[in-house]
Image (cartoon, helix red, strand yellow):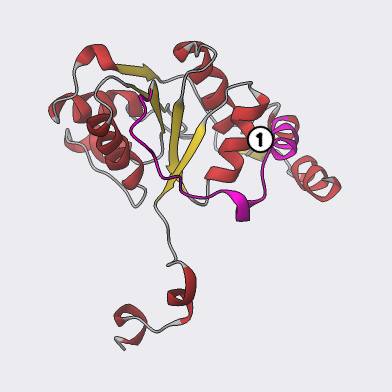
Amino acid sequence: MSGLSEWCESIELITLPGGRRFHPLRPRSAAQARRCASGCSRPSVIRAVVLDRRARNGIIVLGGAFDTRVARTRGMNELNDAADRVTAGMELAQRYPKAKLLFSGGVAALLEEDIPETEAAEALYRGLGLAPDRLLLDGRARDTFENAVFAKELAQPKPGEVWVLVTSASHMPRAVGCFRVAGFDIVPYPVDYRTPSGPALWRPSSTTTRN
């Protein structure tokens, strides 16, 4: 933990044109990073869960999958390489038709205000047929810790409820840590894997042998 703390606190303020200054980790983020890390499981124990047929109360999809600059300038939604977050959320919503779908995004742009991800998510999910009364949107979060805090505030989970958290596999350990610190018990559902599993990891693929 000392290495993480030193790294967070060593980041200097960056000065933008016009004299505006900001901290890359945002105010309070050094402390938030330490708290999230303290509640985080080792990456090796964050596994994809096999969801059974028991009723699920809610699905939480973390933002980061929309290219909001394209949406703002071209008037149409565009998903980036984290699109699995959004599509997996819809897949789970179809599998569990009584579950709420909570999308937690925001605007993280530093130099200009792109459209909120929640606006893009609402258009996409409603366009795919998700009932408006099943969709919960929170556009205030600026980082993973705030995703957790605001998601809990909006979901108001009750004892015994099951909420599934959807985000990229590489992001899941940090997300689980933040949700634990926030006191929101979730079931991790990592997606957007960038490597295969098991022996296939060491076998050549058509992608690696193409050239």
Q: How many marks?
A: 1
Residue of label 1? 23
Q: Is residue 45 a member of the stretch shown in magenta?
A: yes
Quarter holding residue 56: top left
The region drawn magenta spans 32-56
Whole-percent x, y for residue 42 in the image: 67, 50
Q: Nearer the viewer, residue 7 or 206?
A: 206
Specify whether residue 20 is in view: no
Whole-percent x, y for residue 64 in the image: 41, 39
In the image, residue 58 above or below residue 205: above
Identify which residue is drawn at 21% across, 28% down.
125
Left or right of 164: which side holds 75? Answer: left
Rendered-image quadrant of the C terminus: bottom left
Q: Is residue 49 a member of the stretch shown in magenta?
A: yes
Main SS type for the magenta part? loop
Specify whether residue 167 is in view: yes
Left or right of 183: which side holds 153? Answer: left
Whole-percent x, y for residue 5 in the image: 81, 42
In the image, residue 146 above or below residue 10: above
